[in-house]
Structures are given as C-alpha cells and as structure tokens.
Amino acid sequence: MCGFNFILDKKLKINEVPIARMASATQHRGPDETSQLHFEYLHKSRVYFSASRLAITDQSLYGSQPMQSHDGRYVLVYNGEIYNYIALRNKLETLGCHFYGQSDTEVLLHWLILHRESGQQALEGMYSFVFADLQEGLILMARDPSGMKPLFYYQNEDFIIASSEIRGIMASSLIEKSLNTGQIQNYLSYRYPIKPETLINHVYELEDGCQIRYLDGKFYHHKPQQIADTDKTEARPGLKDLENVLQRAIQRHIQTAVPGGLLLSGGVDSTLLLALLQQQSYNLPVFSLVNSENERAFGTQDYLYARKAAKQFGAEHHCIEMKVRDLDLFEDFLESVDQPVADHGAYTNWLICRYASDHVKYVISGAGADELFAGYNRHWAYYQYLRYYRILMPALPLLKYGAERLPDGFDHPFRKSFRLYKKLISGIDPNPETTFLNFQKLKGLYLAPDLKNDASAFALNAEILFRKALYQDEHGYLSSDVLAISDQMSMRWGLEMRMPYLDENVKRLAQNADALYLISKGRKWMLKKLLQNMGAAEFAYRKKEGFGLPFGKWLRKKEGRYLLESLYQPDAALYQFVSFANLKNMIDAHTMRKADFSQEIWACLLLQKWMEKHF
C-alpha cells in the first residue's frame, strides 16, 4: 500500500525537481519509506518514478518501490494489495521465476513482465499501478475493477503524468490549474464529478477496471465490457454459499504481520464481519465513531448498537464520540481533501482514521455490501416502483403533494422516515432510469435545469432495470463517493483500508445472482439472515442509518454557525453555479427548523471552502 507518482518527459524538458515535489505532496500515503528513480527512455526521453510506502505484506527492503527488475529493463510503482499473490507467485515459480522477498509488489512485477496487458485479468485485490518496459517503450497503467485504489493522469505533447492523487499531479507544476466548471453540476447533483473527468481541467481519473497503454507515441485506453441489456436466468445462491465466500474473503484480508482493526458501526455489514472474524478466532480491536444519544435524530444510533456488538462478540472496543467542537478541525480536514465529495462520510472517515492510525496499520471496512446486495433504502423503493409502476403513476401527484407537507426540520420520532419518504417520492419519474438517478441526487442547487429522458423509450423489464441500478451504484456512488473518501481519508493518516465485501469471489456471487432475488425479501436480506443465524438478529434488523454526522444539528449551534459565514458572501465563487437567494433560503429554513437541508449545505460549504483554498 502506498502512493506513487510518474512522469514521462517526452522532450527532455525537466529535471528531478517535479517528481520530488510530487513525492513530497503524497508522502502521507506511505510513512514508512519514500524513494524516487529516473531512467532514460526511448526517443531521447526520460521517465521518473516515486513511491511512498506503507509496508504491510513484506516490511523488508525487498518490498521497496519503485521496484526495478534485476536486468534493469522493467520498473513498477504500485498501490494496493493483491490478495491472490501467493497463487500467482506459485505459478511464476513453476516457470522459473526467482523471488528475493515476500511482497506482492515483486510478484506483480514478474507477473506483468510475463503477461503485460492481459495480466490484469488474473489479479484479485485493490490496486493501481504504472509499469514500464524501458527497452520496448511500453507504459502500462491500470486500476482494479471496483475502483478501490485511485489513479489520476494528465497527458499532452510534452508529458504523461500520473499519481495516486490529484494533488500529486498539481505539485509537479507542469500543468496550469483551472476549475472544470462542466463537472460542478455533477458534483452538486450526485456529490462527485463523473469519471473520467475531475474538478480540474485536463486531469482525468482512470475508470474502474480500465487500462491505459502508451507505446510508439500512441495512447490507448481500454475499458472493460459493461453490463449487458439482456434478461437471462441467473443463479440463486444459498446462505451457505454466501457464508463460505465471506469466510474466504476474511482470510485473504487479514494480515497478521502488522496490527489491524475493524471499523464497527453496529449495523449489518460491520457486525457480520465482526461475527465472521470471531468465528475464525481473529481478535481484532474495533473502532466506532458515534454521536451522543441526544443527537440521534440527526445522527445515528451507533452509540448503542456498536457497544452491544463489541460486547457480544468479545472485541476490544475503541469508541470515539463526535462532538460539535470537532467542527473546529474543519480546516485540518480540508487539507486532506484531494477532490471534494459532498458526503458527510468524508469527515467521519477522517475522524475515525485519525484515531485508528495511532493503534493499527490497517482497518477492515464494510464498504461495498450495500451496493452488491441491494442494501439502500433507494433499492427497496426502486424495487417497489418497478413492481407497482402502473398503479403508482396515476397516484403520483397526490403522493408528491402529501410528501411535501411532512415536517423534517426539527427533532421528532418520525423525522428520518419523513425525510426519506419526501426524498423518494419527489424523485419518482415516468422513466425508471431517471427515477433511480433522482433517488441519489441532491435537490435544488444547480442553476441549470435537469434534462429528462424520453419516458416512452424504455421497456419495463424489472430484472434488467434493477441490475442496471445496482451496476450504477457500484460504479458511480460506491466508486466515486464511498471508496474515494475511504481512500483519501485513510491514506491521509497512512492507514490502509480493506473491504472484504469487494473480494472477487463475493462480488462474483452477488453479480451472478438474479438481481430481483437479492431484494425479494427486503434490503440486503441475505446478509441479514446470515447475521441472524449467527445469533445477532438485533443488529440484523435495526434501521438503515449510514455513517452519519449530526451536521444538520451542529449548524444550529453557536459552535457550528461560523462555518456558514463564507456562504453569506454574495460574491463567493460558489454563486457562479448556485443561486445565492436559493441557498440562503435553504440555510434560513434549516436554521429555523422548518426543513432539513444539511446535505445540500454541506455540499456547498465543502465546494466553496475547497475553491477558496485552491483557486
């Protein structure tokens, strides 16, 4: 696990200073070692590499990066973990490969030397890398199929630049920094820019599972095949099948050479991982970030369930309570934001990883379970929408009229239910694909009108539409929101985050299953039933709450109001994209407890503060 940087200087225009600046800017990703190398390349050009290493699998110098083959021909910089590296190593040894250390980096180098572009198909894990054949002139860049590990790049007639973070590319000072205003609408609608674009002009993010190959002066971009528009009979895996693949995933994700822990919310995903860990006699400490009980209406009830789960399964529990004074750390948090994602989870991840990094070198996370096993409220709502489409459409005006009048701006027992109902009902559209996108969107921020799809141009095939929705969540929300902030905020503290639910075998089971089967008995019913069978029904059937920050309530307190000051400036950069009057009305309605606009306010605040800092 590390951060890496790469420059191909096509015309010998630079020296080692840009790669050194890049290495310094991304050093937080690998606190154990930082190194850089440069080599002559074909056609009177030069390549520069740097890597900052977080030593997990092999802590010896044999795992150091950049890694060069013994004949000097090949070079690799790599970020991540290859979980099947032992099997790949065994195959390579039968072919005569000799290994000096125990790292997966050395295995990956030899694997790519042998298989080049086709070698990615056999890799199981989280990764991004740059591999170079200095003799042939091949540069190969790739990213794992789930998008767990990032890779950003820039190219023109003089340079190809790549890095684990946008800040790395910008630190090179080889490109002009300008805001990609075309992606602001996506940020304010979906919380993130849409890959391959970023919020910086001409800096791109390699998409999930993609490869870039540079050879003979040509840039080739390969994308994996997307989900097919065909209805076919799919598997219906049993609970024992699921338990078996999860057990194997746990075994592959636990690293006993260094201390690790588990992020525990007391919800289905993390509690099931804790139960499976205990079943295999792994005694990892658990870390929970909770709000106080009197803030549960705007936060979560993790304060209750996380403690119960840790006690039931005998785990050493580190429970960190969030308080409004944590907002005093907002400027420090902003330093960790490479590219903003309008999700409270960025801040909660930053807080818990800051604490956990003092105790362990890696943490296990439940990320990915909701997207693979249909765990979100929007999945259940979309399933019901598809089932009752023809009944729902005539009644829609009345449903929307009633939903708009439900109070959700102050503390009361039904606040969260009312807020969810309003969001889902307001998102319903005659077009199913538009409806699912609406279920994800923030409302009422961007100045331009939304574009509607042609409501007549679809076939109401529930299986295909629901599978597409899960695919959209996996390669949109999961990759660009959940995994993006998981990587940014864990690596800020030199902490590795591992996601067993995104193990290749677990993904294969979920993706080969009938999509409607995954939702037929309720949200994430397979995981819930498995957890119930392990004696934890209380955690299996608690309400879905997410990794919540009581930001909405904190904004109404004296300690939190100072954050709104920059949003009250009509000449702020934000108001190129958002109506000042509209946002001010949202803030006023929120602070006066008439409505809850905490997500929209957070999105605007983070964007404005980020633009102030960088532009």
Image (spheres, grey):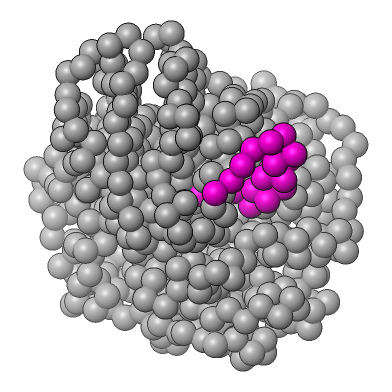
**Which of 87/158 is in front?**
87
Corner quadrant of residue 573: top left
Answer whether residue 379 is visible to the viewer in this image: no
Numbered range of the magenta stretch:
80-100
Corner quadrant of residue 427: top right
Which residue is at a point 35% across and 60% down the rendered structure image?
A: 32
Rendered location of residue 545, percent (x, y):
55, 69
Q: In the shown orientation, is residue 112 left or right of residue 482?
A: right
Which residue is at a point 17% across and 24% down the rendered structure image?
A: 14
**Which of 343/214 is in front?**
214
Tell me if residue 444 is in the magenta stretch: no
Tell me if residue 90 is in the magenta stretch: yes
Residue 25 vertical position relative to residue 430 in the rendered view, above or below? below
Which residue is at a point 33% across and 74% down the rendered structure image?
A: 553
Which residue is at a point 32% across and 60% down the rendered structure image?
A: 31
Q: In the shown orientation, is residue 360 left or right of residue 29?
A: right
Residue 581 vertical position relative to residue 413 in the rendered view, above or below? above
Q: In the shown orientation, is residue 225 left or right of residue 135?
A: right
Rendered location of residue 208, percent (x, y):
54, 36
Answer whether residue 41 is visible to the viewer in this image: yes
Residue 228 vertical position relative to residue 193 in the rendered view, above or below? above
